[in-house]
Image (tube, helix red, strand yellow):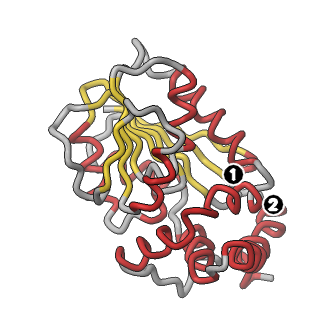
Amino acid sequence: MASLLDTRSDITSPDKATIRSFFEGIASRYDRVNSLLSFRLDELWRKKAVRLILNEQGSGPETILDLGVGTGKFLEEFLRAKRWERAVGVDFAGEMLRLGRTKLPSACGLIQADIHELPFGSESFDLVVSSFTLRSVKDRNHFFGEVRRVLRPGGQAAFLCLTRPTNFLMRLAYAPYLKFYLPWVGGAVSSDANAYQFLSQSIQAFPSPAEIEGELARSGFRRSAVSAFTFGISTLIRAWI
């Protein structure tokens, strides 16, 4: 059983081109498979995250940037919650963006770009968000520096992440799901076993929320907060400059 709990050993991350090919290949089935694999909890996590983010933004953000926007489900929740002066999503997978354009308002800008090198001037946004994307970032220190650069003073960054529960009994139940059930079912439904093997491994290798908070502090964020959802299977990590 110890081997099931040691989920961060012997895991290597593919290069950016490979990751991009995974997301391009599963774009049309991505939302449906995620809903199936999370037992529809992903919808609840997004809604809870939006409420927390907007309730603690202070005077109220007017501009929002969603990094790794995918098909736009997270950004869509923010657009439902309030009116925005400017809403932009960035993703490196063109097929994901194509699907996003079919359901997001035309005024919402969707840009195909590498989230490691953001095509925006400094201090461009009040709020930068990301859902289930941080695990795919190859250089988090550089990425966090870019996020901080495009945030305005007093701005907030918020990352909704798939994480591992800290409770021992929950970990006993979750580890087999993560290592075996998730890649098998995801691969069977999406017809791309490699993509969901990567998803499983990226969650296993992802640092703890406390470690991410330390990285954010070293990148110049003045404070951070962590909110765990569903026993820590999903976690919202927020940071302010």
Of residues 200 and 104, the one nearer the viewer is 104
The mark total stands at: 2
In the picture provided, is 15 more to the left or to the right than 166? left
Pointers 2 and 1 in contact (C-beta within 8 Å): yes
Q: Residue 93 carries which label?
A: none
What element does badge 1 sit on? helix
Picture coordinates of residue 114 (x, y %)? 29, 60
Structural crowding at the residue carrying mark 2, measured as other residues with C-alpha within 10 Å and reported as few (<14), some (14–19) or many (≥20): some
> Which picture quadrant has residue 94?
bottom left
Instruction: Look at the picture and state if 14 lies above or below 105.
Output: below
Q: In which quarter of the image is the N terminus?
A: bottom right
Q: Name the residue under label 2.
A: 170
Residue type pointed to by label 2:
Met
Of residues 172 and 150, the one nearer the viewer is 150
Q: Residue at x 49, y 68 (%)?
A: 23
Q: In which quarter of the image is the C terminus?
A: top left
Q: Which residue is drawn at 56% across and 52% down?
A: 161
Q: Mark 1 points at which residue?
A: 232
Q: Which residue is drawn at 67% across and 73% down?
A: 190
